[in-house]
Amino acid sequence: MQDWLKIFHGPFQPFPASDIAVKIAVTLALGLLVGFEREWSNKDIGARTFAMAALLGLIGSMLGPGALVISGTAILILIAFANFRSISVQRKLEATTSLALALIFLLGILVGEGHIFTPVACAILVAMLLALKPQFRAFAGGLSQQEVRSAILLALLGFVVWPLLPDHYIDPWNLIQPREDWIIVVVIACLGFMNYVLLRVYGSRGVYLTAILGGLVNSTASAAELAATLSATGLGSLAVPVVLLTSVAMFLRNITILAIFGHAAVRAAVFPLLAMTAVAAFWIYRDYHKAETAEGGPPLALSSPISLRKVLRLALLFLIIQIVATLGQRHFGSMGFEAASLLGGFVSSASATAAAASLAFHHAVTPGQAGIAAVLTSMASASMNLPMVHRQKGTRPAMRELLISSVLQIAAGVAVLVIQAQWQHWL
């Protein structure tokens, strides 16, 4: 049998059967995944063509450069004829299907070269992009010029400006390190923009979801806007759970920022913030049924969080809070740092939390101090919702319960901080 196989193969080295079987299976799966989506979209080029194009790439990569050139030329000819027919009959170009077919051919080559993760991930993403065409079209059709400019500006600030900034301290007091400070600002802006997109897509689905997504963007602005809307629509009874939800969302956002830039500080902040969330959750759970009368949810008129003025203001706030907190730590110890963070929370809890996390990352303060600072700045930010609700006549009846809830939230957070401090002292 072995002699017969040697005669059959001749001077050529045979491909290992097990490896080839795996590669063929993966290649077929990738081609069929994208091809079935094209079949579902009623395209002329469907599952069989995509599967064979992927196999053509696989075989071409195994046979060498000459075979790759021939197979690639065949794919280009197929794409050209498909587009010629589409233009002649339907007066439109099949650009998306053509690119998908070329991509599948290249992914087949990657599988032939021994790659698995890259072609599989790319094929899944291609299928997802093709399947989400209605959603992308609906979303893009509703974009304003300001929002498009905001996305471009965010990319410019993150990928063009950031690499050009100095990667060292530029002052004799070691307070300002432009590149590291700027990337923190850009990440916070990215979080705000992502939350803005979610708010824009899902904001009309319900008053509670609007409060959560708005709180992730800017809890104080969301509380002010929602309080005004609830007052104008006669839904002032929803003020307590809605405003508390913006605070809970803000707690979650601050924990996320702390985890990104100073994960060691999360341990000190998570339990006090969870205690504050639990207090808020009691009122939210008690009054959640009131939202049934406002199923559609009020519109939240937040402007896009990315503009040059807003980014520069965020950077300035972050820089001021970081400098004040650093100087407070150097000259007044832990109390000076915590006081600076508390004051920063009245202006921007996101900036204050990021400044504390950055200082912990650079070992200017301990992770425990940064965690306490994040809790204090969250308390300050949550307390800023009270005057926002009090300004609206329709929501003033809810002030008493909101004030009690806010006081209990702060008391719970302080109590857990004290317990943690005593526990650390005992250890």
Image (cartoon, helix red, strand yellow):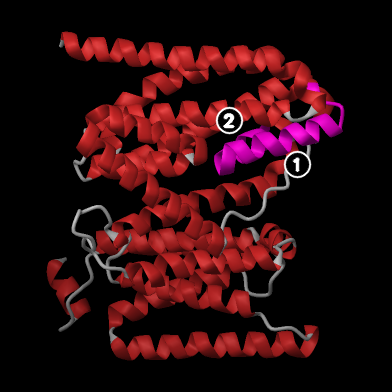
Residue at 78% x, 37% y is 298
Question: Is residue 318 or residue 200 the one in the foreground?
Answer: 318
What is the residue that sits farthest to the left in this orientation?
Answer: 3
Q: Is residue 222 above or below residue 401?
A: below
Mark nearer the N terminus (1 vs 2)? 1
Residue 235 in magenta stretch: yes
Q: Quadrant of residue 213?
A: top right
Q: Main secondary structure of the magenta part?
A: helix
Q: Is 393 placed left or right of 224 in the picture?
A: right
Mark 2 Cα within 10 Å, few/some/many (few <14, many 20+)?
some
Circle 2 residue = 384
Q: In this view, does 121 lie above or below 284?
A: below
Which amino acid, mark 2? Met
Q: What stretch is highlighted in magenta?
A: 208-236
Q: Where is residue 72 in the image (x, y as percent from the top left)?
A: 44, 86
Residue 297 in magenta stretch: no
Query: How many numbered dots are placed on residues in this image?
Result: 2
Is any part of residue 21 visible from this angle?
no
Q: Quadrant of residue 211?
A: top right
Q: Quadrant of residue 8?
A: bottom left
